Amino acid sequence: MAVRSPRGEFFDALETMPPADRVKYLDNKLAAAVSYAYRHAPAVKELLDKAGVTPGDIRTVKDLEKIPVTRKSGLVEMQKARLPYGGVLAAPLEGVERVFISPGPIYEVQPSRVKWFAKSFWAAGFRKGDVVINTFTYHMSPAGILFHEAIRDCGATVVVAGTGNTDLQIQIMKDLKVTGFVGTPSFLNMVVKRAEELGHSVKKDLCIRRAWFTGEMLPPSLRKVFEEQYNIDTYQAYAVTEPGGAIAYECKQKHGMHLMDEYVTEIVDPETGKQLGPGEVGEIVTTQLLNKDWGLIRFGTGDLSSYVTEPCPCGRTAHRITGIVGRAGDAVKVRGMFIVGKQAEQAILGFGQVARYQLIVGRREHRDEMTLRLELKGNDADKARLSLDINSKFQDICRIKIDRIEFVSPGSIAEKQQGIKDERVWE
Ligand SMILES: [Zn+2]
């Protein structure tokens, strides 16, 4: 089944499954995982019983909507009330191999036999012969050790560096001829800047050719700097620690992150928990299928994203999420669509003529309405044209139309007023 040669492109056959097979595969795996968790994890039994759902009711991914979403704050409370694992553990205590600790605190049990991250490191091109510095912490958090194991799965050598000590890390990279970096984009940025301050040429004195990031999104402008200025091929993955692992990862196309088939990942309306369609912004909710002993069903990450279904030229057939656009609390729901400040800003401030904007959400005759107030930089803009262009861009990004665009005189919108303003009164 696996096509994992050291030079192979794919980690396993799941990555190229025909879409109809994937639906069946995920439905079957999910039904088995929920049924097992119901029988062995007391918290899952309580959750389903309370919702009036039996394991037999969960046969497909769509059926998951019947089960409430569990969020980080809920998991903290569950564990506090029933130490040590909040009834999520679906195995005897003495079988627990290792425990990680996330802020909360949340105690997470993860066995080492599971290759949580290997797939995303393979997709990023790490192979035997690479010397990879792992700058994630090896303390408490699962990051350091899980990425370490993934680098080893690719056959590469791991430099066990952990966080901090920028100057020492630069010396290590130079001395050991490190070819791969694993960490956050901001730390690599700090490394290259500091290396230059110390008089090194990043291209000549260091030999980093590949970087794998998670923990924060990689801004396109920073990716350009890494790739064009320093010849570092960059990849990112979206990871969540509570269910454990990389939920989505980039391929060489770097155009969205493929969802992993070891999880059922839904994009849902954070208020109702109902699943949303392609292109619609909602909360990432995930259920892992890798470790049956950890019964965390429908974990709500609080991160907002959307997914696309278009085929990817890389050959992987899984849907892709398009990046993290914000946190669930930051979104405003307008006519059923979630709008996030960052996306609105991208659509509107992308036009150089716009100095400031305010997007007002109001309500008239029981319908949500959006009015965009714009302050321009000069007087020479073709306002009719600009209105059309902005609305078209806004619809591309936010998938909803602005009802009215008004131009206001310079100084009308104070700096802290810029953004989305929800003026709806619900009566
Ligand atoms: Zn791809």
Image (spheres, grey):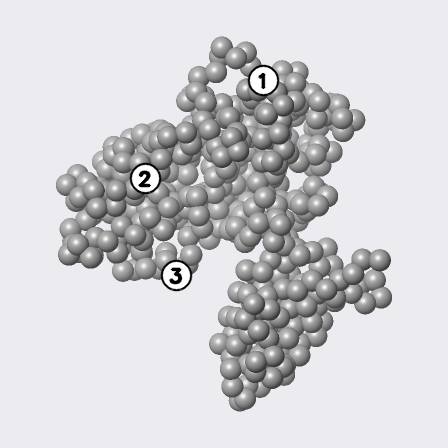
Which three-letter amino acid code belongs to the residue tagged 2?
Answer: Thr
For mark 3, what is the residue?
Answer: 221
List the residue tagged with mark 1. 90
Q: Is residue 316 visible?
A: no
Alpha carbon of mark 2 to alpha carbon of mark 1: how far?
Answer: 33 Å
Task: Give me the residue at 66% from left, 36% from top.
Answer: 69
Foreground tag (2 vs 3): 2
Residue 411 position in % (x across, y down):
57, 80
Determine which quarter of the picture holds residue 264.
Answer: top right
Instruction: State which tag comes first along the sequence, 2 or 3.
Output: 2
**Is 212 left or right of 202, judged from the image as shown?**
right
Whether the residues at callouts 2 and 3 have beta carbons within 8 Å, the answer is: no
Q: Which residue is mark 2?
A: 163
Q: Earlier in the sequence, mark 3 or mark 1?
A: 1
Give the amino acid type for the residue marked by disc 1 in the picture: Ala
Q: Nearer the viewer, mark 2 or mark 1?
A: 2
Q: Is residue 171 left or right of residue 342?
A: left
Q: What residue lies at 47% left-to-right and 39% top-to-bottom?
A: 239
